[in-house]
Amino acid sequence: MSALLEARHVTKVFGGGLLRKTQTVALENFSFRVSGEAPRITAIVGESGSGKTTLARLLLGLVTPTKGEILYRGKALQKLSGEDRRAFLRDVQAVFQDPFEVYNPFYKVDHVLELPIRNFGLAHSRRERRAMVEEALHAVGLRPEETLGRYPHQLSGGQRQRIMVARALLLRPRLIIADEPVSMVDASLRATILGSLLKLNEEFGISLIYITHDLTTAFQVSQDIIVLYRGSVVEAGDVEQVVRDPQHPYTRLLVGSIPLPNPDRAWQGERVLGRPAAELAPISASYCKFHQRCPFAMPICVQEAPPLFQTGGRRVTACYLYREAPALQAEELVTIFADGHRQQAAATESTLDGETS
Ligand code: SF4
């Protein structure tokens, strides 16, 4: 069966036109698959300029790949039409960093919530529409009497963001792509919003792609993780393994900057390895993109870009420190996560069997 959403060898290059001659490779040869059967939470992590927001926009069909393709249920996203396009717009929802950008300040939040119900003809009456809105608000921990009838500026940032989660939920999507959903709210509200997203996964069986620069929240909510650096996957696998025992020097740098209780970790305090990615020289395909910041750089690192080395059952690292491990092609990244999807699908099936027997 085809995946719900798949990125196949996707590269996105910006610039390079007549007026803007400089090209920026935002994402390079990225392959990934979201299963239609097993709801998983995958974190895409990286600092500014890593390509994570470009990836979100590609998966949502907001920008087109320069090379490769995005497929929805096996069909090219850019060529979808009619029913397929409508199904995609319902199945794949987005929650963005700044909910204020999505709101029209002249409309009450009722309008924001009711619009998708109307657009997709999900309710037969006003009463049914109201019941759906209230159910979605309750699901994200909001009280309808405290949110409906208000304008966006009358709500807190946390409330506005949870309304966007409720809005996404109204359409009963199969996948939510959340791009930095908690980066603009107070730390005290982050747990509530992340809790709402987790609930969507656990209670409603919705997959989540959680895009963030924050490894701590990625660790809290996700099962799988993909670490991006300057548009390439540098490490991926089970989140527990990657965060507790990071392999790639860049992941070690990220982990070294968060307060995880791990006394065995040798990377505490090693927070600055060089200049941030945005200040570094243009990328060449012929070397490791991290070599200018890497304390372990070897001659081979500037001769050829490292492939993904499979360092464990569900683990890959693009670093020559692990060159004894088998090398994978970029598209084989999807096989790393396949076992987790299969186990999850089996667990979901047995839960459903238990509920119906
Ligand atoms: Fe460092 Fe070389 Fe590994 Fe790149 S491939 S992260 S430069 S050791």
Image (cartoon, rainbow, N blue to C red):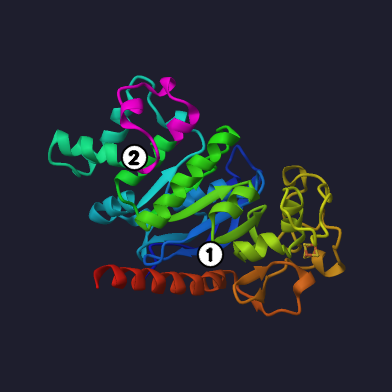
Q: Quadrant of residue 291?
A: bottom right
In three-dimensional space, the C-alpha distance between marks 1 and 2, rounded to whole angstroms, equals 36 Å
Q: Is mark 2 within 8 Å of ligand 1?
A: no
Ligand 1: quadrant of the figure: bottom right
Q: Which residue is mark 2?
A: 138
Q: Which residue is mark 1?
A: 31
Could you tell me how many numbered marks the image carries?
2
Return the residue nearer the eye: 301 or 34. Answer: 34
The kind of residue tagged 1 is: Ser
Closer to the chain start, of discs 1 and 2, is: 1
Q: Is residue 229 inside the magenta stretch?
A: no
* In the rendered image, the vertical position of residue 72 relative to residue 54, given as above or below: below
**Residue drawn at 55 percent across, 33 percent down:** 185
Return the residue nearer the eye: 100 or 51. Answer: 100
**Circle 1 — which element?**
strand
Return the residue nearer the eye: 111 or 318. Answer: 111
Does residue 18 appear anywhere in the picture? yes
Mark 2, Cα crowd under 10 Å, few <14 / some 14-19 / many 20+, is few
Q: Quadrant where the N terminus lies?
A: bottom left
Residue 24 spot, x, y in % from top left? 64, 47
**Residue drawn at 79 percent across, 70 percent down:** 321
Does residue 206 appear anywhere in the picture? no
Q: Quadrant where the C terminus lies?
A: bottom left
The kind of residue tagged 2 is: His
**Circle 2 — which element?**
helix
Residue 314 spot, x, y in % from top left? 59, 72
Return the residue nearer the eye: 293 or 213. Answer: 213
Q: Which residues are magenta?
A: 138-161
Residue 195 spot, x, y in % from top left? 48, 46
Mark nearest the camera among 1 and 2 is 2
